């Protein structure tokens, strides 16, 4: 009798496990992976202070006013106090009065990040 009870218990265990497993199977779905670059390579070069790469990209036709992650290249140069790059960008037509998505200009980014050289240059241009 004990053997029968154990066998029945094991059988019921398998039965409930099988039923539960078959009810919990979800339909398969397809996932699409999208790679999103937040900051383009031109602006990364500015942040790193790589003047040669910035010059080369401008020669190849890079737009000096194209926003990346809501900021213009001049904003990145001002924010990270890259004075030589900021001067180059201005020489190539970068606009310093453009506002970011947060409503700030390159001057404001320089001010907030305490980029004294870039801030002094921008103020010199304003006067």
Image (cartoon, rainbow, N blue to C red):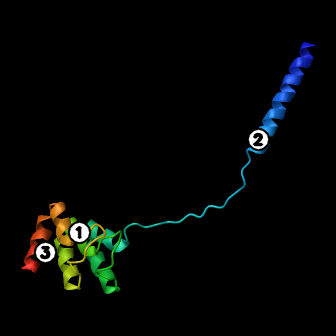
Marks 2 and 3: which is nearer the front?
2
Q: Position of residue 8 (x, y in %)?
A: 89, 23
SS under mark 2: helix
- Going from the N terminus, do you reach mark 1 or mark 2 first? 2
Q: Is residue 65 above or below residue 75?
A: below
Marking on residue 104 = 1
Q: Which residue is mark 2?
A: 21
**Residue sitting at x 73%, y 44%:** 24
Q: Is residue 81 visible?
A: no
Q: Residue 16 appears at what percent x and percent y?
A: 80, 33
Question: N-terminal of the two: label 3 or label 1?
Answer: 1
Q: Position of residue 114 (x, y in %)?
A: 15, 61
Q: Residues within 10 Å of mark 1 (few under 14, many from 20)?
A: some
Q: CA distance from mark 2 to mark 3?
A: 67 Å
The mark found on residue 12 in the picture is none
- Which of marks 3 and 2 precedes in the sequence? 2
List the residue tagged with mark 3.
Answer: 122
Return the residue nearer the eye: 43 or 55: 43
Task: Give the answer, above or below, for where 21 lies relative to 90.
Answer: above
Query: Quarter of the image holding residue 87?
Result: bottom left
CA gap between label 1 and label 2 equals 56 Å
């Amino acid at each position: 009798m004990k053997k029968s009870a154990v066998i029945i218990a094991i059988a019921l265990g398998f039965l409930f496990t099988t039923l539960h497993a078959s009810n919990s199977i979800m339909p398969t779905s397809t996932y699409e992976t999208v790679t999103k670059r937040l900051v383009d390579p031109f602006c990364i070069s500015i942040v790193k202070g790589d003047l040669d790469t910035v010059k080369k990209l401008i020669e190849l036709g890079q737009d000096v006013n194209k926003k990346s992650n809501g900021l213009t290249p001049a904003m990145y140069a001002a924010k990270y106090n890259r004075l030589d790059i900021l001067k180059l960008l201005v020489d190539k037509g970068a606009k310093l009065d453009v506002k970011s998505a947060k409503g700030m200009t390159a001057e404001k980014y320089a001010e907030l990040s305490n980029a004294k050289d870039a801030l002094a240059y921008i103020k010199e241009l304003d006067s």
